[in-house]
Image: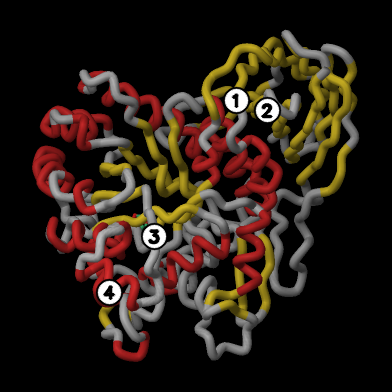
């Protein structure tokens, strides 16, 4: 049995809705086919953007989409993607060995965001671009005054500014984004940032590229010095263990500590920020690429991989980490929305199916904007697993997070039993709250290796679940390898 205490009044911070965000790059079949099919396509679309994937993202209430990369961003020149589509230049996509038609450019991306209801998050080109090119993109998107660039935007169909709030100043600038040393990137970042805010008629927030090695973050922040130029520091975390679908039980357990490394990434980035930030201004941590990257996902197959229940469960454990660190995590973006890596939906021509990961997002979506509350563990069975460096860890079989919506007087408790063969009885005691009613949903499958596909699109899907909530107690018996989202009405 697992015993938890939920401290309803112990608020850890507001869960930024942006934590349940997406990342879409010009890579494989993410943009072309996954999101953009073109106006002439037989696949139902609205102004070229496919309706089924948009509907799936709308249902998730996708809060934000980061675009155009990824590595692609630092070799992308935005003027290529505006103006009449037939006249746009065709370029090489050097990172993903493709030809880029530029048919999906700034206006199409903003249209995608408007159709899905998501905020746009644009990643600027630092590696092969200039401060002027970056600043001009901001002016093109966000300037309300009748400058030539704003008029170009209006001529492209949008007299109203796009009001893009989030701007990444490069991507992985320690790698594909220019192979900078941290202090060189800091100097470059400062030079870029100096010219960006002034081009926007609405406030913008700038995201700097961080790293999972703390030394990069510290050297970058120390050299940057001026925190007025920075709003968020980003880190990326990918992980894998064994094959996408034919993994062993040991590899199943070992994937957890690999993924949960993200907790340390967040802590180290936050520590580095605290060390150098003398302004008192809040600078958040963004995990703007994360997810499982199986060996099956190779560059020559567009980083396509199958997605099992295991991937969804491990993603949910990462959501628990983000929720618990709501005070510092300002955004997270799963890599990548459609057809690439740990996507939420996959397509094959006109067919589309939702991955198990989609359902994890769906079960967790009510956390968005809620107040994260402390969950203490009183008693918990564990299983043995190994970290990437081989160290043995005892993994708690239940991963949990909880949040409260004070207006609606509801508590969302998300629980996962990661044990492969044993069910787990969970007793959660509410401190400072009394439960009235519970509505719960369960995600599991016969085998943790199960996935959805074109011929079995709903093999892994959520169903309703019986739990008990009475007074100060919530009780549930979680089947092996399962995830439960319980919405509890509070008195
Ligand atoms: O998501 C695939 C790639 O992974 C991105 O282009 C890059 O930023 C990261 O290394």
Q: Is residue 139 left or right of residue 223?
A: right
Check the picture and name the quadrant holding the N terminus. Answer: top right
* Helix, strand or loop at mark 1: strand
Label drawn at residue 205: none
Residue of label 3: 162
Say if 341 sits above or below 370 in the image. below
Q: Earlier in the sequence, mark 2 or mark 3?
A: 3
* Marks 2, 3: nearer the viewer: 3
Residue of label 4: 152
* Marks 4, 2: nearer the viewer: 4
Q: Residue 124, located in which quarter of the rendered image?
A: bottom left
Q: CA distance from mark 3 to mark 4?
A: 13 Å
Q: CA distance from mark 4 to mark 1?
A: 42 Å
**Residue 368, image x, y percentages:** 60, 38
Q: Residue 416, located in which quarter of the rendered image?
A: top right
* Helix, strand or loop at mark 3: loop
Residue of label 2: 405
Q: CA distance from mark 1 to mark 3?
A: 30 Å
Residue of label 1: 371
* Near-viewer residue (13 or 420): 13
Q: Is mark 1 within 8 Å of ligand 1?
A: no
């Amino acid at each position: 049995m697992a015993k938890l205490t939920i401290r309803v009044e112990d608020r850890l911070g507001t869960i930024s809705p942006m934590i349940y965000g997406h990342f879409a790059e010009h890579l494989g079949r993410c943009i072309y086919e996954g999101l953009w099919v073109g106006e002439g396509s037989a696949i139902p679309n609205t102004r070229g953007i496919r309706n089924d994937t948009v509907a799936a993202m709308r249902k998730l209430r996708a809060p934000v989409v980061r675009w155009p990369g990824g590595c692609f961003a630092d070799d992308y020149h935005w003027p290529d993607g505006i103006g009449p589509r037939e006249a746009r230049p065709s370029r090489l996509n050097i990172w993903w060995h493709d030809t880029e038609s530029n048919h999906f450019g700034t206006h199409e991306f903003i249209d995608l965001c408007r159709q899905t209801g998501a905020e746009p998050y644009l990643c600027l080109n630092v590696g092969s671009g200039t401060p002027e090119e970056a600043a001009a993109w901001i002016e093109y998107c966000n300037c309300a005054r009748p400058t030539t660039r704003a008029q170009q935007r209006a001529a492209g169909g949008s007299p109203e500014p796009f009001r893009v709030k989030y701007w990444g100043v490069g991507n992985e600038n320690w790698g594909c984004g220019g192979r900078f040393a941290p202090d060189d990137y800091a100097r470059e970042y400062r030079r870029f940032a100096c010219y960006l805010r002034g081009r926007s008629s609405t406030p913008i927030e700038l995201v700097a590229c961080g790293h999972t090695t703390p030394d990069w973050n510290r050297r970058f922040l120390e050299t940057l010095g001026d925190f007025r130029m920075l709003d968020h520091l980003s880190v990326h975390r990918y992980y894998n263990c064994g094959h996408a679908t034919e993994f062993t039980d040991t590899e199943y357990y070992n994937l957890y500590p690999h993924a949960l490394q993200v907790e340390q990434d967040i802590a180290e980035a936050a520590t580095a920020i605290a060390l150098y930030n003398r302004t008192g201004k809040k600078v958040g941590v963004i995990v703007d690429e994360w997810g499982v990257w199986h060996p099956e996902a190779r560059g020559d197959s567009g980083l396509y991989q199958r997605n099992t229940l295991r991937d969804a469960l491990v993603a949910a454990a990462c959501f628990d980490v983000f929720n618990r660190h709501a005070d510092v995590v300002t955004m997270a973006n799963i890599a990548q929305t459609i057809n690439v890596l740990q996507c939420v939906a996959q397509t094959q021509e006109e067919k589309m199916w939702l991955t198990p990961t989609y359902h994890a997002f769906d079960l967790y979506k009510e956390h968005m904007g809620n107040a994260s509350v402390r969950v203490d563990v009183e008693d918990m069975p564990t299983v043995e697993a190994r970290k990437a460096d081989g160290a043995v860890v005892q993994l708690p079989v239940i991963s949990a997070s909880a949040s409260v919506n004070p207006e609606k007087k509801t508590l969302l408790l998300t629980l996962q039993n990661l044990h492969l063969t044993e069910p787990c009885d969970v007793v959660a005691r509410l401190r400072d709250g009394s439960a009235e009613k519970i509505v719960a949903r369960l995600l599991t499958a016969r085998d943790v290796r199960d996935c959805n596909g074109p011929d079995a699109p709903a093999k892994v899907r959520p169903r309703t679940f019986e739990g008990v909530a009475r007074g100060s107690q919530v009780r549930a018996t979680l089947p092996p390898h399962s995830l439960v989202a319980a919405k509890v009405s509070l008195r």
